[in-house]
Image (cartoon, rainbow, N blue to C red):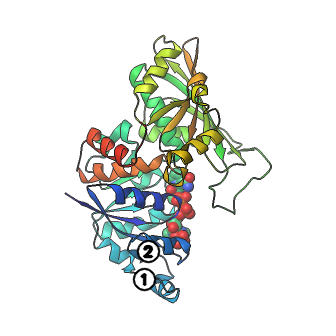
Amino acid sequence: MVIKVGVNGFGTIGRRVADAVALQPDMKLVGVAKTKPDYKAQLALKKGYPLYASGEAGVGEFEKAGLKVEGTVEDLLKTVDIIVDATPGGVGEKNKPAYEKARVKAVFEGGEKARVAAVSFVAQCNYDKAYGADTIRVVSCNTTGLCRTLHTLDSVFGVKKARATLIRRAADPEDIKRGPIDAIVPDPTTLPSHHGPDVNTVLPTLPITTVALKVPNTYMHVHSVSADLRQPVKSEDVIEAFQRAPRVLLVGKDEGLISTAHLFDFARDLGRPRQDIYEICVWRESVMVVDGEVHYLQAVHQEADVIPENIDAIRAALKSADVEKSMKTTDSTLKMLK
Ligand SMILES: NC(=O)c1ccc[n+]([C@@H]2O[C@H](COP(=O)([O-])OP(=O)(O)OC[C@H]3O[C@@H](n4cnc5c(N)ncnc54)[C@H](OP(=O)(O)O)[C@@H]3O)[C@@H](O)[C@H]2O)c1
């Protein structure tokens, strides 16, 4: 079975999802949709991706710019099994009735409210819950990062309670509208942040409280996580659990990977497209156990960690593979290290 996939929204996430879909042996990228006929539209055509017009501007704006378009999003919906909606947060919910009308399954992103979809999704946590679902929401980059490591700890040792402080990149590299450029901003000042409740959309029984701060950089978030465990452990046990966990990469002094700048450089030399790091990077030396509580630091590449999840969400929705097979195919096509 070849799954016919459309991608609505060709920005930070949509472009990466489209490239990842194009790599899958069991998927066909039928087309991508944009509102503006800008350089990203030109690049889509250069890559051979059929282009569709979304929003009010319609087909005319693209034709005026000399760009070939196949039609509107409505036309795209007639030809796909599933649409990945990678439009800005809140727009996906507005697009949902069109997907329902076309009887097309939909994957939404983490900027949408959880109510947009039947299941909030992280493959290694709840793939089976999403099996056959008509609507799936791949949770945000931060929530994905927290779920991958906390689910690992909860499955192996049991987590009584977790707390996390998120140091967030302020903007994506191409984003010229957001700051700060010289401040550390509590985000929000009224605690807790929304990330804990968002983790609970995937891991409903895990008690977690989160705090978030925005800092002036564009590549990666860093999380300081603490989890009170149900059984006595040593730091080596936790490191071993992370070693076994899918999509979690242990990094540290041995390799000289001691900052997000080093991770960026590493991804560049790995030849990763756009320096993308799909894995959650846990600093090995940061793993510390005190009085039954484990503490660790992890880095999350905000533009990339949700990409494998989008691919697995497509297979789960279409019931085309079980979790192991789907994650294995995704990870090998994206050349993931783990
Ligand atoms: N960026 C991240 O780090 C990140 C990480 C994880 C999850 N997410 C989530 O992924 C989703 C997409 O985020 P993104 O960062 O990829 O957004 P983005 O870079 O701003 O891209 C959004 C895309 O949607 C298109 N679009 C369609 N309808 C639109 C409308 N009504 N208004 C404006 N643009 C519209 C835009 O087209 P034009 O360019 O032609 O206008 C653009 O291609 C959001 O839910 C976000 O929360 C983002």
Q: Position of residue 331 (x, y in %)?
A: 37, 43
Q: Position of residue 88 (x, y in %)?
A: 53, 62
Q: Toward the viewer: 108 or 254?
A: 254
Q: Is residue 183 above or below residue 68?
A: above
Label 2 neighbourhood size at 10 Å, few (<14), some (14-19), many (20+)? some
Q: Which residue is mark 2?
A: 45
Task: Locate the C terminus by quadrant.
Answer: top left
In the displayed structure image, the side of residue 103 where residue 169 appears, left or right: right
Q: What residue do we see at 62% from left, 55% from top? A: 172
Q: Which residue is mark 1?
A: 68
Q: Earlier in the sequence, mark 1 or mark 2?
A: 2
Q: Position of residue 315 (x, y in %)?
A: 29, 51
Q: Is residue 157 visible?
A: yes
Q: Is mark 2 within 8 Å of ligand 1?
A: no
* Amino acid at dot 1: Lys
Q: Position of residue 24 (x, y in %)?
A: 31, 54
Total marks in image: 2
Q: What residue do we see at 46% from left, 48% from top? A: 306
Q: Quadrant of residue 327?
A: top left
Alpha carbons under labels 1 and 2: distance apart: 8 Å
Circle 1 — which element?
Answer: loop
Q: What residue do we see at 25% from left, 50% from top? A: 132
Q: Are marks 1 and 2 in contact (CB under 8 Å)?
A: yes
Task: Locate the N terminus by quadrant.
Answer: bottom left
Label 1 neighbourhood size at 10 Å, few (<14), some (14-19), many (20+)? some
Circle 2 — which element?
Answer: helix
Q: State the mark number for residue 249.
A: none
In the displayed structure image, the side of residue 322 where residue 250 appears, left or right: right
Q: Is residue 193 visible?
A: no
Q: Is residue 21 above or below residue 217?
A: below
Q: Is residue 274 above or below residue 157?
A: below
